[in-house]
Image: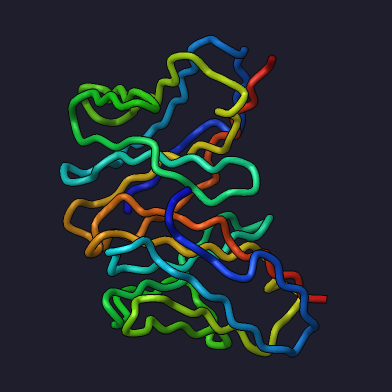
Amino acid sequence: DAKTTQPNSMESNEEEPVHLPCNHSTISGTDYIHWYRQLPSQGPEYVIHGLTSNVNNRMASLAIAEDRKSSTLILHRATLRDAAVYYCILRDHFGNEKLTFGTGTRLTIIP
Amino acid sequence: DSGVTQTPKHLITATGQRVTLRCSPRSGDLSVYWYQQSLDQGLQFLIQYYNGEERAKGNILERFSAQQFPDLHSELNLSSLELGDSALYFCASSVAGRLPLHFGNGTRLTVT
Protein backbone atom coordinates (compact mmCIF):
# COMPACT_ATOMS: atom_id res chain seq x y z
CA ASP A 1 0.00 0.00 0.00
CA ALA A 2 1.12 3.54 -0.70
CA LYS A 3 2.60 5.60 2.12
CA THR A 4 0.93 8.44 4.01
CA THR A 5 2.50 11.31 5.94
CA GLN A 6 0.81 12.92 8.94
CA PRO A 7 1.98 15.40 11.56
CA ASN A 8 3.05 13.67 14.75
CA SER A 9 0.83 15.79 16.95
CA MET A 10 -1.74 18.58 16.91
CA GLU A 11 -3.62 20.58 19.50
CA SER A 12 -7.03 22.14 19.26
CA ASN A 13 -9.38 23.97 21.55
CA GLU A 14 -12.56 22.32 22.69
CA GLU A 15 -15.66 23.13 20.65
CA GLU A 16 -13.62 24.38 17.70
CA PRO A 17 -13.20 22.65 14.32
CA VAL A 18 -10.13 20.49 13.80
CA HIS A 19 -8.47 19.85 10.46
CA LEU A 20 -6.17 16.84 10.42
CA PRO A 21 -4.02 16.70 7.26
CA CYS A 22 -2.67 13.67 5.45
CA ASN A 23 -0.32 13.62 2.47
CA HIS A 24 -0.30 10.68 0.09
CA SER A 25 1.55 11.80 -3.02
CA THR A 26 2.02 8.25 -4.38
CA ILE A 27 -1.65 7.30 -4.17
CA SER A 28 -2.89 5.11 -6.99
CA GLY A 29 -6.21 5.31 -8.77
CA THR A 30 -7.68 2.37 -6.87
CA ASP A 31 -6.53 3.42 -3.39
CA TYR A 32 -9.26 4.35 -0.95
CA ILE A 33 -8.39 6.78 1.87
CA HIS A 34 -9.40 5.43 5.27
CA TRP A 35 -9.30 7.14 8.65
CA TYR A 36 -9.29 5.35 11.96
CA ARG A 37 -8.74 6.71 15.43
CA GLN A 38 -7.53 5.13 18.63
CA LEU A 39 -8.76 6.52 21.91
CA PRO A 40 -6.68 5.91 25.03
CA SER A 41 -6.79 2.30 26.21
CA GLN A 42 -9.00 1.22 23.31
CA GLY A 43 -8.63 -0.46 19.97
CA PRO A 44 -8.73 1.57 16.77
CA GLU A 45 -12.17 2.55 15.49
CA TYR A 46 -13.31 3.37 11.99
CA VAL A 47 -14.00 7.04 11.31
CA ILE A 48 -14.57 7.54 7.58
CA HIS A 49 -13.31 6.64 4.14
CA GLY A 50 -13.48 7.96 0.60
CA LEU A 51 -12.14 7.63 -2.92
CA THR A 52 -12.51 10.93 -4.77
CA SER A 53 -15.47 12.92 -3.51
CA ASN A 54 -15.74 14.58 -0.13
CA VAL A 55 -17.58 12.44 2.41
CA ASN A 56 -19.59 13.22 5.52
CA ASN A 57 -20.84 11.04 8.33
CA ARG A 58 -21.95 11.54 11.90
CA MET A 59 -18.38 11.50 13.20
CA ALA A 60 -16.48 13.63 10.72
CA SER A 61 -16.00 14.91 7.18
CA LEU A 62 -13.31 13.90 4.74
CA ALA A 63 -12.09 16.45 2.23
CA ILE A 64 -10.05 14.99 -0.64
CA ALA A 65 -7.88 17.18 -2.85
CA GLU A 66 -8.71 17.21 -6.53
CA ASP A 67 -5.42 15.49 -7.41
CA ARG A 68 -5.96 13.07 -4.50
CA LYS A 69 -2.42 13.63 -3.25
CA SER A 70 -3.71 14.88 0.09
CA SER A 71 -6.79 14.74 2.27
CA THR A 72 -8.08 16.35 5.44
CA LEU A 73 -10.16 14.85 8.20
CA ILE A 74 -12.45 17.47 9.68
CA LEU A 75 -13.96 17.24 13.14
CA HIS A 76 -16.54 19.98 13.11
CA ARG A 77 -16.68 20.67 16.83
CA ALA A 78 -14.02 18.91 18.86
CA THR A 79 -14.84 17.58 22.31
CA LEU A 80 -12.53 16.16 24.94
CA ARG A 81 -13.65 12.69 23.83
CA ASP A 82 -12.05 13.31 20.43
CA ALA A 83 -8.57 13.23 21.96
CA ALA A 84 -6.98 10.25 20.22
CA VAL A 85 -4.39 9.14 17.70
CA TYR A 86 -5.79 9.54 14.18
CA TYR A 87 -4.52 7.27 11.41
CA CYS A 88 -4.77 8.00 7.71
CA ILE A 89 -4.44 4.77 5.73
CA LEU A 90 -4.50 3.98 2.03
CA ARG A 91 -5.92 0.69 0.94
CA ASP A 92 -6.05 -0.67 -2.61
CA HIS A 93 -9.64 -1.51 -3.45
CA PHE A 94 -8.50 -4.70 -5.15
CA GLY A 95 -5.99 -5.70 -2.53
CA ASN A 96 -6.33 -7.53 0.75
CA GLU A 97 -8.45 -5.68 3.26
CA LYS A 98 -5.82 -5.76 6.04
CA LEU A 99 -4.81 -2.26 7.04
CA THR A 100 -1.26 -0.99 7.44
CA PHE A 101 -1.12 1.60 10.20
CA GLY A 102 1.48 4.36 10.30
CA THR A 103 2.32 6.47 13.33
CA GLY A 104 -0.72 8.73 13.05
CA THR A 105 -1.40 12.15 14.55
CA ARG A 106 -1.90 12.48 18.28
CA LEU A 107 -4.68 15.02 18.78
CA THR A 108 -4.85 16.85 22.08
CA ILE A 109 -7.99 18.80 22.92
CA ILE A 110 -7.52 21.79 25.19
CA PRO A 111 -10.49 22.52 27.49
CA ASP B 1 -18.77 -1.25 21.88
CA SER B 2 -17.39 -2.74 18.66
CA GLY B 3 -18.87 -6.18 19.30
CA VAL B 4 -15.43 -7.81 19.21
CA THR B 5 -14.53 -9.50 22.49
CA GLN B 6 -10.99 -10.24 23.57
CA THR B 7 -9.96 -12.22 26.62
CA PRO B 8 -8.17 -11.91 28.88
CA LYS B 9 -7.79 -8.13 29.22
CA HIS B 10 -4.48 -8.46 30.99
CA LEU B 11 -1.93 -11.24 31.13
CA ILE B 12 1.31 -11.33 33.07
CA THR B 13 3.67 -14.21 32.51
CA ALA B 14 7.34 -15.09 32.62
CA THR B 15 9.88 -15.45 29.86
CA GLY B 16 9.83 -18.84 28.18
CA GLN B 17 6.16 -19.43 28.86
CA ARG B 18 3.31 -19.93 26.43
CA VAL B 19 0.00 -18.05 26.40
CA THR B 20 -3.20 -18.11 24.40
CA LEU B 21 -5.20 -15.01 23.55
CA ARG B 22 -8.80 -15.39 22.52
CA CYS B 23 -10.98 -13.33 20.21
CA SER B 24 -14.70 -13.55 19.49
CA PRO B 25 -15.60 -11.59 16.34
CA ARG B 26 -18.77 -9.59 15.79
CA SER B 27 -21.76 -11.72 15.02
CA GLY B 28 -21.74 -12.57 11.33
CA ASP B 29 -18.15 -11.49 10.67
CA LEU B 30 -16.10 -14.14 8.89
CA SER B 31 -12.68 -12.46 8.90
CA VAL B 32 -10.44 -12.11 11.93
CA TYR B 33 -7.23 -10.09 12.06
CA TRP B 34 -4.54 -9.97 14.73
CA TYR B 35 -2.38 -6.91 15.39
CA GLN B 36 0.43 -6.24 17.83
CA GLN B 37 0.99 -2.78 19.27
CA SER B 38 4.20 -2.06 21.11
CA LEU B 39 5.58 1.32 22.12
CA ASP B 40 8.39 1.31 19.58
CA GLN B 41 6.67 -0.46 16.67
CA GLY B 42 3.16 0.92 16.53
CA LEU B 43 0.34 -1.25 15.22
CA GLN B 44 1.74 -4.20 13.31
CA PHE B 45 -0.42 -6.63 11.33
CA LEU B 46 0.26 -10.22 12.30
CA ILE B 47 -2.19 -12.52 10.54
CA GLN B 48 -5.67 -12.77 9.04
CA TYR B 49 -8.13 -15.64 8.89
CA TYR B 50 -11.22 -15.89 6.76
CA ASN B 51 -13.83 -18.51 7.59
CA GLY B 52 -11.25 -20.79 9.16
CA GLU B 53 -8.54 -20.43 6.55
CA GLU B 54 -5.38 -18.34 6.78
CA ARG B 55 -5.70 -15.49 4.28
CA ALA B 56 -2.79 -13.12 4.86
CA LYS B 57 0.34 -13.11 6.93
CA GLY B 58 2.27 -10.13 8.20
CA ASN B 59 5.24 -9.81 10.51
CA ILE B 60 4.32 -12.79 12.66
CA LEU B 61 7.15 -14.58 14.42
CA GLU B 62 7.55 -18.33 14.07
CA ARG B 63 6.99 -18.61 17.84
CA PHE B 64 3.49 -17.23 17.27
CA SER B 65 0.61 -19.11 15.69
CA ALA B 66 -3.08 -18.57 15.27
CA GLN B 67 -6.17 -20.39 14.19
CA GLN B 68 -9.83 -19.71 13.59
CA PHE B 69 -12.33 -22.30 14.75
CA PRO B 70 -15.60 -23.44 13.11
CA ASP B 71 -17.56 -21.13 15.41
CA LEU B 72 -15.36 -18.32 14.00
CA HIS B 73 -13.61 -17.40 17.24
CA SER B 74 -9.86 -17.16 16.95
CA GLU B 75 -6.90 -17.82 19.19
CA LEU B 76 -3.41 -16.40 19.03
CA ASN B 77 -0.77 -18.61 20.63
CA LEU B 78 2.49 -17.07 21.74
CA SER B 79 5.25 -19.41 22.88
CA SER B 80 8.81 -19.16 24.22
CA LEU B 81 7.90 -15.68 25.33
CA GLU B 82 10.55 -12.97 25.46
CA LEU B 83 10.55 -9.60 27.19
CA GLY B 84 10.12 -7.94 23.79
CA ASP B 85 6.79 -9.69 23.27
CA SER B 86 5.24 -7.42 25.89
CA ALA B 87 2.64 -5.46 23.98
CA LEU B 88 -1.03 -4.89 23.36
CA TYR B 89 -2.55 -7.51 21.08
CA PHE B 90 -5.64 -6.48 19.17
CA CYS B 91 -8.10 -8.58 17.31
CA ALA B 92 -10.35 -7.12 14.62
CA SER B 93 -13.12 -8.60 12.53
CA SER B 94 -14.92 -7.69 9.34
CA VAL B 95 -17.83 -8.87 7.26
CA ALA B 96 -16.71 -11.36 4.62
CA GLY B 97 -13.31 -9.72 4.34
CA ARG B 98 -14.62 -6.24 3.63
CA LEU B 99 -13.76 -2.98 5.38
CA PRO B 100 -14.19 -1.43 7.84
CA LEU B 101 -12.39 -3.43 10.47
CA HIS B 102 -13.91 -3.53 13.95
CA PHE B 103 -11.36 -3.80 16.74
CA GLY B 104 -11.61 -5.21 20.21
CA ASN B 105 -10.06 -3.45 23.17
CA GLY B 106 -7.04 -5.69 23.23
CA THR B 107 -5.14 -7.96 25.57
CA ARG B 108 -2.23 -6.37 27.37
CA LEU B 109 0.57 -8.92 27.66
CA THR B 110 3.40 -8.32 30.10
CA VAL B 111 6.34 -10.69 30.02
CA THR B 112 8.60 -10.48 33.08
Q: Which residue is drawn at 56% across and 38% down?
A: A85
Residue B58: x percent and y percent? Answer: 43, 71
Q: Residue at x 60, y 24 (%)?
A: A10
Q: Residue A109 sits in which quadrant?
A: top right
Number of marks in picture: 0
Q: How is the image coloured?
A: rainbow
Residue B86: x percent and y percent? Answer: 71, 69
Q: Residue A22 sits in which quadrant?
A: top left
Q: In this view, does A96 lie to the left or right of A110?
A: left
Given the current orientation, which residue lies at the most extreme top position?
A: A16
Q: Which residue is drawn at 32% across and 54% down?
A: A1
Q: On screen, B14 above or below A77?
A: below
Q: Is residue A15 left or right of residue B98?
A: right
Q: Considering the image in quadrants, where does the C terminus of chain B appear?
A: bottom right
Residue A93: x percent and y percent? Answer: 19, 51
Residue A5: x percent and y percent? Answer: 46, 37
Q: On screen, A67 above or below B87?
A: above
Q: Is residue B107 left or right of residue A104?
A: right
